[in-house]
Amino acid sequence: MIKLTDLTKREFADFWEKDGSKNGSAWQKIEKEIALLCNYEKTGKNRGIRYNILEIYHTPKEQVHGNKYREPINKGAVDKTSLKYQLAELLIQLGGTDYLTKNGYLDLLGFKTGNFERLMKKFDEVKYHELKTSDQYVFKQVQNVQLALARFMDNALDLIRKETFDGVILDERLFVVFNDESHENADVLDDLEGLYSLYKQARAEAQNNVEAEYGTSLFFATRMKYINYECAELIESDDKYRALDDNGISFFYKKYAINKAIVPRHYDYEVEDYDGGNYESNSLDIENEAYDFLARFIEHRKEDSHKHINSLIKKGVQGDFLSESIMLFFADELFDFMFADCGDKFDEVYARLIEDAKEAENEQLEDELNEGMSFLPSKVDFDPWAS
C-alpha cells in the first residue's frame, strides 16, 4: 500500500516528485503547488512536522489569477455573467427545499437527463483505449461534462458560502452512512472530527490505489465505484482505520440547504392573492432560467471539446472517422443528443448519430475526389481506325 499519512517533508515531496531539499519561501512555494494537486494537512512543529494527504484531486485546481500564487488585484469582484454565478442564482431560487446533495440539486434543475444517464451506463466497465475514435470522443465528452457540472456546482456553492449574495447563507451538514445502510446526521458521532479525518485518509488511499492499478482508462463513474469498494475494504481490513470499522461507519457525504432572508408578502384583497405572483409562475421562471443556463453550458462544452478533437486527429487514432470537420459536426449533434431524452430509442438514435457522421464523411471524401478529378484532362473520344 502507498503511504499517504504521517509523511515527512522528504516523503511528501517525493510523492509529488518535488524537491524536498528546499526551505523557507522556496518550500512554501512548492507547498502551494502541491495544494493545487491535493488537499493535505500539516501536523507537528519544526522537525516534527508531518503531512497527511486527505484527498487527491482528479483534475488539478486552477492557480489564482494575476501574479503567480498571489491574489488578483480585483479580488472580490464577481463576473455576474459567468456560468458559476448564474448557477448560484438558480440554486438560490430553489432555496427553501430540504437538504440536498450536489447531485440532488442537479437532478432538481433537470441537468441529469435520460440520455445523459444512459451514456454513463454505456461506458461503465469499459476501457477508453479499447474504443474506436467516435466512442472515445463520446466517452471523453460525457466524462468531461460530468466533471464540469461538478466543478460549476462547487464554484456556485462557494460563491454562496462566501456570502456573495446579500441575505443568503449556505447551510452545510455532514451525514454518515453506517454498515446497516442507515443515514444519520454525523453530529451523532462522539469523535466526529477524528473519524471524519480518518475517513478522508482512507478515501484518499483508496483513490490512489485504484488509479495506480487502472490509471485513467476507466470511466469516471466506474472509477468512483471502484474507489468506494476499495475504501470499504480498507476500513474493514486495515488496522489504522479500525476506529471507523468499530463505529460501523461505511462512508460520509454532505448535504446543503440555501437559506434566504424572508421578505414579507402582503395580501391583495382585490385579487385575493399575495403580491409577487404564485408558486407556479416562480417554478416556470426557474425552469426557463435553468434552460438558459443549460444552453450556455452546452456551448461552453462544445468549444472545449474542439481541443480534444484536435488531439485525436494529431494522434491519428484508428477507427470510424478522423476528419476534423466531420468530428466538429458530430460534436454539435452529440451535445444536443446528450441533454435530450430519447427513451427506449436511445440505442437507435445514438447509432444513427454515428452513421450520419460516417455518411457525411463519405460525402466529403467523394466531393474531394471529384474536385481532384476536375483538374485532369477531359476525356475525349478515341477512334483507333482514324487516320
Image: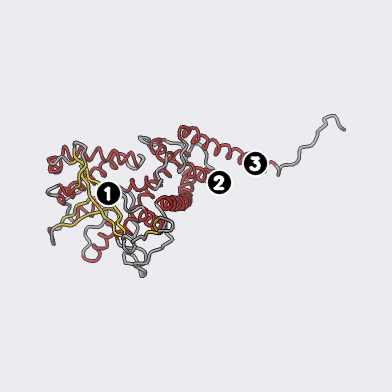
For the point 48% across and 33% down, the residue is: 345
Q: Disc 3 and disc 1: Cα gap in Å? A: 56 Å
* Side (left or right) of 188 relative to 311: left
Q: Nearer the viewer, residue 248 or 305?
A: 248
Residue 48 lies in quadrant: bottom left
Does dot 1 land on a helix, a strand or a loop? strand
Picture disc at residue 255: 1
Picture disc at residue 367: 3
Residue 235 lies in quadrant: top left
Q: Nearer the viewer, residue 140 or 96?
A: 96
Q: Residue 51 location in percent, x, y?
A: 18, 54
Identity of the residue furthest to the front in this view? 270
Front: mark 2 or 1? 1
Q: Disc 2 and disc 3: Cα gap in Å? A: 14 Å
- Looking at marks 2 and 1 on the same chain, the residue that comes earlier in the sequence is marked by 1
Q: Residue 280 location in percent, x, y?
A: 42, 50
Image position of 186 with respect to 44: above or below: above
Does dot 3 land on a helix, a strand or a loop? helix
What amino acid is at disc 1?
Lys
> Tag 3: Cα neighbours inside 10 Å, few (<14), some, or many (≥20)?
few
Q: Which residue is mark 2?
A: 325
> Tag 2: Cα neighbours inside 10 Å, few (<14), some, or many (≥20)?
few
For the point 14% across and 50% down, the residue is: 194
What amino acid is at disc 3?
Asp
Q: Are marks 2 and 1 in contact (CB under 8 Å)?
A: no
What amino acid is at disc 2?
Ser
- Image quadrant occupied by the N terminus: top left
Picture disc at residue 215: none
* Side (left or right) of 379 relative to 180: right
